[in-house]
Image (tube, rainbow, N blue to C red):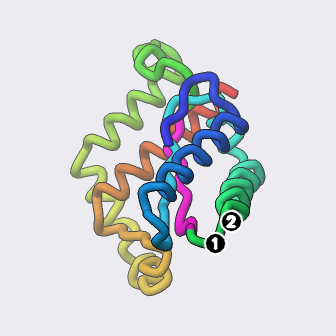
Amino acid sequence: VPLQADDGRSALLAAVERQLTDVRSRAEGRRIAVRIVIRGRCQIHYELASRTDREEVIGEIRNRANDSGDDLWVEKIRFETLPPIDLDQLRGGNDLMGELLQSLRQAAEDELLIEGIRSELQPFVEKVGPELRKAEVDFDNPKQLIDWLRQAEALLIGRLTE
């Protein structure tokens, strides 16, 4: 579900409903399981940074999907939003924010650092491996570690620019 810079909660919910309606129409009466990914540089990013608000939005999405019939099941909802700001401009700054963003980008591109993170987490993985697999957490997957760094960047930017 793509969002635009000015989109808030009502725009997000309307966009999700449009997508679900479209999916239902293409399903031709079959039962459907969906994973919803919400993306974009948007105003609601700031709201989604709060765990309480994020859970509330997830609940609203699930309720709307359930209210429209029992032929659709929302398996997972994921947010890949960013604040509606120019990251490249912030990253290019000669201030603390610029340095932080530059460091996070470098970390995500540094294979040795990613491998070091993975190695540091290995004792933890050995202790709680089955639980991690249930939660679809794979510290052996460098792409997942890089994705977490990008998510951390988005959370930091959201908090620091809020």
**Residue linked to disc 1:** 70
Q: Quadrant of residue 60?
A: bottom right
- Pinpoint residue 7: horizontal percent, then vertical percent: 63, 29
Contact check, label 1 and label 2, Cβ < 8 Å: yes
Q: Is residue 148 left or right of residue 54?
A: left
Between 37 and 91, the one nearer to me in the picture: 37
Q: Quadrant of residue 84?
A: top right
Specify the segment rendered in magenta. Answer: 72-82
**Residue linked to disc 2:** 66
Instruction: Give yes or no for residue 126 being in the magenta stretch.
Output: no
Q: Quadrant of residue 150?
A: top left
The kind of residue tagged 1 is: Asp
Instruction: Give yes or no for residue 76 being in the magenta stretch.
Output: yes
Between 115 and 39, the one nearer to me in the picture: 39
102, above or below 12, in the image: above
135, above or below 13, in the image: below
Q: Is residue 75 left or right of residue 159?
A: left
